[in-house]
Amino acid sequence: MSKKFLGILLATAMVAGTLVGCGSTAPATTDAAPAAAAEEAAPAAEEAAPAAANGQKVGVAMPTKDLQRWNQDGANMEAELKAAGYEVDLQYASNDVQQQVSQIENMINGGCSVLVIASIDGDSLGTVLASAKEKNIPVIAYDRLIMNTDAVSYYATFDNYMVGTKQGEYIRDQLDLDNAAGPFNIELVTGDPGDNNAKFFFNGAMDVLNPYIESGKLVVKSGQTKFDECATAEWSSANAQSRAENILSSYYADGTNLDAWMCSNDSTAQGIVAALDANYSGTWPIITGQDCDIVSVKNMIAGKQSMSIFKDTRTLASQVVKMVGQILAGETVEVNDTTTYDNGTGVIPSYLCEPVFADINNYKELLLDSGYYTEDQLQ
Ligand code: BGC
């Protein structure tokens, strides 16, 4: 990643602005300087983690620096935790499961009091987390649920199923599926099979779209409608692009029009846009996304991606810092969902933040007015 990009991320990630969806809010500031912003964030974080911080160390394990959102999540978490008086061990694992396992081992052996983990593969942390449990180190699953281990104490995320339903509903409404004659052609792409979120996104969208596929109003020319057929290893744009190229050359090269491509997130949407740019000459399809990555917001402005889902990473970080404080103070930990997320050992008490619909009509209000991005970043 370029220094410039990193600088932009650090600057924007730490700006506490209007927060969407979660209970905890930080005061707004327009100052993008990291140090100043971290200080600005302090009051909210101190409120969240009263006397408990006391210099204790919190381990924060993020999956990769390759995708914009995890850089923002990591930077937000680090700034908020430090402002609240914690020491922070923040690690990124290049989407390499073994690397993440050894980073977590180091956190456990290095004296971390709480672990906050956005897993690469939700099923691969059982062994290392058993040793966290042995040492009574609480674990918060961050954004992605960690599966099949009883070492996970809490889960904080956005409402993943709702993300998918918003994407499906957008396609339904834009194509006016309840009234228009159709049929319309659609293709589908979702995320990494090792990420528990991906199935929630996909199922949310498909629960809206399936009735129209079954009635024939939506036609999937490739026939690829099952999760495994639509999955994208590591959520990589390149993997999504090469699958899209195959589909376009097999089913749309004869001039067949494509009306929509349901994409579970922005990195996959970017791969689809690249494939369409080079291999498709029909009317530009509706393309969904998630994260409001800078590249995708630019694509939205250029008319190449129709919508995205804004998951304000500042709100998730604030909520998790609050949870850390409550755990360490022995207080009741605030959750708002105790039914949805069973990780195979039972339901994990969760805090779900609300994802927000974003498109060309409201992106300025959501992303610029709230200080999430500057106008320059979207040029
Ligand atoms: C996150 C999405 C993100 C995807 C790829 C998912 O677990 O919830 O926001 O787009 O991972 O990083």
Image (cartoon, helix red, strand yellow):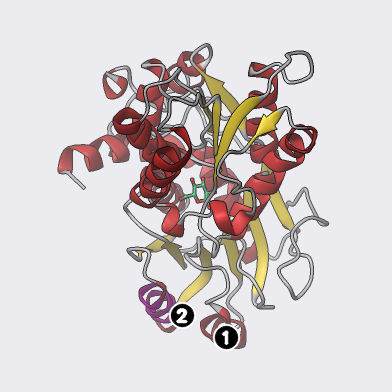
Residue 299 location, quadrant: top left
Of labels 1 and 2, earlier in sequence is 2
As for residue 334 lying within the magenta part, the answer is: no
Instruction: Give the secondary structure at mark 2.
Output: helix
Is residue 188 among the parts visible in the rendering? yes
At 78% from the left and 38% from the top, the residue drawn is 214
Chief SS of the magenta region: helix
At 68% from the left and 39% from the top, the residue drawn is 205
Residue 185 location, quadrant: top right
From the viewer's perspective, tell me whether residue 172 is left or right of residue 50. right
Is residue 144 among the parts visible in the rendering? no
Category of crowding for the residue at label 1, using alpha-carbon neighbours closer than 10 angstroms: few (below 14), some (14–19), many (at least 20): few
Q: Are marks 1 and 2 in contact (CB under 8 Å)?
A: yes
At 37% from the left and 22% from the top, the residue drawn is 281
Residue 296 location, quadrant: top left
Q: Nearer the viewer, residue 360 or 339?
A: 360
Residue 108 marker: 2
| Amino acid type, residue under disc 1 in the picture | Lys
Range drawn in magenta: 98-108
Residue at the outermost front position: 254
Residue 303 marker: none
Is 181 situated above or below 160?
A: above
**Residue 228 horizontal/vertical position (percent):** 58, 59
**Residue 238 horizontal/vertical position (percent):** 33, 49
Residue 135 marker: 1
Is 363 situated above or below 230?
A: above
**Residue 42 horizontal/vertical position (percent):** 46, 41
Q: Quadrant of the C terminus?
A: top left
Number of callouts: 2
Instruction: Give the secondary structure at mark 1.
Output: loop
